[in-house]
Amino acid sequence: MIYAGQVPFTLAHPAAVLPLRRRLWFPGLVAGAVAPDVGYYLPVLPTHDVLGGSLAAVALLLVGRLSLPSLMALAPAFVRVRVSRPGDFGRPLVRASSVVVGVLTHLLWDAFTQTDGWFVQQWDWLDVPVIGPHRLYNVIGYVSSAGGMALLAWTAVRCPKGQDWPARAGASRYWFWTLVGVAVVAGAIWSLSDPVSQVSDYDWVRRLLLGVIQGLCAGLGLHAVLWHLGQSRR
């Protein structure tokens, strides 16, 4: 069983690093911003601290670099023309510091919005009830997650276009998207089978999102393997 508690939505966390994207290494910032939550999706060593989160971020960057061409092969044109090619491994100190800064933004956000967050433990006013069982820090987490996702969407729309990536075409594209869709549904069903999902509506939604993301990653991971096998035979 994977228990995530009441925390901001994982995919909203990169919104916190957007103001730093022109000064530091953006991929490292993003990887660091989501990496502390890896332990909620995979049975790995603790990742919700600076060291564990940084190591998880490095793993995410390596996996992302290897799987990026296959991801772009399935992505819609709107996405493909807005994702740049990965660069070299220069400026290692900047890259390393970007990862750590990304992790720190995640931990700071959670400190205000997580049940055992440092500021939640220090400031009683964050623990006041708002609606039913939802405390103020819960509501801050919900609102900031929605705001973060909206900000990321707005930033993506405004992102300048660049060079397109090679893409799958024809029937194979739809077959692979069907495969990914099946993996997403299977992940959701498996996750909702956990008794925790029946505790509250929040837990049901949380388990659903966990399962969807796990299934999506599994489906895209399988496609990445098949993509590289296909490329090696050409």
Image: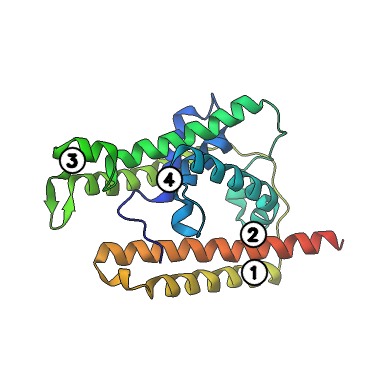
The answer to whether residue 141 of the structure is visible from this angle is yes
* Nearest to N terminus: mark 4 or mark 2: 4
Q: Residues within 10 Å of mark 2 (few under 14, many from 20)?
A: many
* Figure quadrant of the C terminus: bottom right
* Nearest to N terminus: mark 1 or mark 2: 2
Hey, what amino acid is under mark 1?
Phe
Q: Which mark is residue 126?
A: 3
Between circles 4 and 1, the one closer to the viewer is: 4
Verify CB contact (< 8 Å) between mark 1 and mark 2.
Answer: yes
Q: Which residue is mark 1?
A: 176
Q: Which residue is mark 2?
A: 74
Q: CA distance from mark 4 to mark 3?
A: 21 Å
Task: Residue at 31% x, 43% y: name it.
Answer: 144
Q: Nearer the viewer, residue 50 or 170?
A: 50
Q: CA distance from mark 2 to mark 3?
A: 43 Å
* Nearest to N terminus: mark 3 or mark 1: 3
Q: Which residue is mark 4?
A: 48
Report x, y in % for residue 155.
47, 39
User: Above or below — where is 201 with respect to 155?
Assistant: below
Q: CA distance from mark 4 to mark 2?
A: 31 Å
